[in-house]
Amino acid sequence: MKKFILCTLVLMLVISGAAFAAKSVSEAGKLGVGMFGTTPTVSYNFSDSLSGQIGLNYLTSSGAGAAGQLGVLGSVAWDMYKVGANTVNLGALLNYTSNFACVSGLNAMTIALTWGAETKLNPSLTVGLVLFPISYTSVSIAGATTTNLGVFNMNNGAGAGAGATLTGRLYL
C-alpha cells in the first residue's frame, strides 16, 4: 500500500510539472495592438513581467470655439502576480494633450499610478480594467498653469476624468 501511495504521489508530481511547463509560455517579445480606454495603442512585452504601450488620442469638445486636442499616451506595467489566466499589475502612465488649433494654447499633462488586472480570453487576446489610484495633472491655458492631484481621478485636460478604464489587446 505504501508503494502505491508513493507511486501515485510521484505520478502526480510528474503530471503537474508537465502541465505547468505547458502553461508557462514566454510572453517576452510579443507585440500587440489594442485600446486603452478610447486610445488606440501598440504594446510590447519587454519580458514575462514587464510591458509597455504607446498610443495616439484625439479629444473633441463641443460649444463655441471648440477645437480638438491631439495627444500621446504611454504606459508601463509590471505584473505583480498571476493566478491562472489572470494577471494583477502595477504601473505608471503619462498622457500629454495639446490643443493645436487654439491660439492661446491649451496643453495638459497627466502622470498617474496605475493598478490593474487582465485576463487572457485566449493566447492572443487579453481584456482588463485599470484603476488610477493617484494622478497628477497640469493644465496650461494662455500661459496660466493649474495643477490637480487626484485620487481615483484621471483628468486629461478635457474636463472631468475617470477613476478607471477598460483595456483590450490583441497579440500579433
Image (cartoon, rainbow, N blue to C red):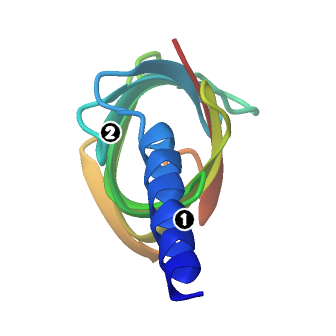
SS state under label 1: helix
Q: Which residue is mark 1?
A: 12
Specify whether 20 is left or right of 95.
right
Q: Is residue 104 visible?
A: no
- Amino acid type of disc 2? Ser
SS state under label 2: strand
Q: At x 60% / y 51%, what residue is drawn?
A: 85
Specify whether 24 is left or right of 124.
left
Res 99 quadrant in image: top left
Residue 14 in the image, given as x and y percentages of width and height? 45, 56
Residue 65 in the image, given as x and y percentages of width and height? 64, 26
Could you classify mark 2 by the number of other residues whose Cα lies within 10 Å: few (under 14), some (14-19), or many (20 or more)?
many
Specify whether 136 is left or right of 125.
left
Depth check: 19 or 5 in front? 5
Mark 1 to mark 2 CA distance (whole Å): 34 Å
Depth check: 139 or 49 in front? 49
Q: At x 37% / y 33%, what residue is drawn?
A: 27
Depth check: 65 or 57 in front? 57
Above or below, 159 relative to 95: below
Depth check: 74 or 33 in front? 33
Q: Which residue is mark 2?
A: 51
> Which tag, 1 or 2, sits closer to the chain's start?
1
